[in-house]
Amino acid sequence: VRAGQRLASMLRCTRAWRLPLEGLGPHSPSFARVPVAPSSSGGRGEAEPRPLPLSYSLLDGEAALPAVIFLHGLFGCKTNFNSIAKAFAQQTGRRVLTVDARNHGNSPHSPDMSYEIMSQDLQDLLPQLGLVPCVVVGHSMGGRTAMLLALQRNLAVRQYLLTNLVEVDGRLAWRLNLDALAQHLDKLLTFPQRQESYLGPTLFLLGGNSQFVHPSHHPEIIRLFPRAQIQTVPNAGHWIHAERPQDFIDAIRGFLV
């Protein structure tokens, strides 16, 4: 609950934030405009939102091995996993994909935002890239997207400032689609109700100092993922991959053996 309150407070503060470009100096970074997709759920006769062409980065590797997909959390982007992705590709020889979720990073903006449509975005992208089957590693919002992706498609799931700014009409604004995130924040802070289970091996990696996954959540995790391993990384908070990167990589590599 407190985590949700903090996120809601951050959204309220950042939605109105704007900064003029003038006076930033000659060494200021340049920004590209973010594509905007029209709503596909507001018109008549269109009951389901359409998948969006997500922005991604793919590191080459051995095609015979399942690729590893990294999904960032709320307010994040694919560059959050840059160093992890490079290290993982070098240490395992696998192809590694990092992806910007819709309304994040360089992916298109859309008023449609839910775990169902984020899962659909990936179901559209991964076959196009020839990355099915694959191993999906998600952090926070990305972890919930990975969970739903596994439940829906039976895929194998093993489970800030400058990068989020963009130029809009001569002013700096958030690259994030804060209006869509704020409108659907309640959906992003909860996991969709599902009756089916994913019977493949799954890893839930928790930070020892994080309060995001409570022991009371474990029974539901086991119901949805009966073969789940729940592993804790000591001295880490919610951002395990940033705080303990080698422990993060070692845990995933150990799980894949």
Image (cartoon, helix red, strand yellow):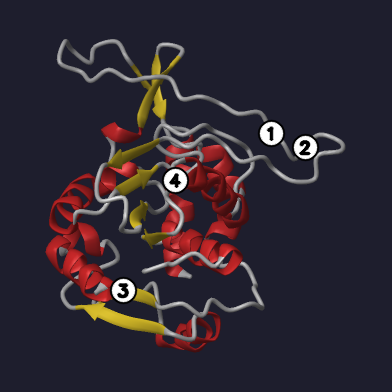
Quadrant hosting residue 152: bottom right
The quarter of the image holding the C terminus is bottom left
Q: Nearer the viewer, residue 171 or 220?
A: 220
In contact (CB < 8 Å): disc 2 and disc 1 = yes
**Tag in front: 3 or 4:** 4
Could you give the CA–CA distance between mark 4 and mark 2, rounded to whole angstroms?
A: 32 Å
Residue with the mark numbered 1: 39
Q: Which residue is rendered at x = 31% and y = 56% of the image?
A: 64
Residue with the mark numbered 4: 130
Assign a secondary structure to mark 2: loop
Could you give the CA–CA distance between mark 3 and mark 1, rounded to whole angstroms?
A: 35 Å
Mark positioned earlier in the residue sequence (2 or 3)? 2
Q: Amino acid at mark 1?
A: Ser
Q: Amino acid at mark 2?
A: Gly
Q: Amino acid at mark 3?
A: Leu
Residue with the mark numbered 3: 205
Assign a secondary structure to mark 1: loop
Task: Tell me if residue 215 comes above or below residue 243 in the rendering.
Answer: below
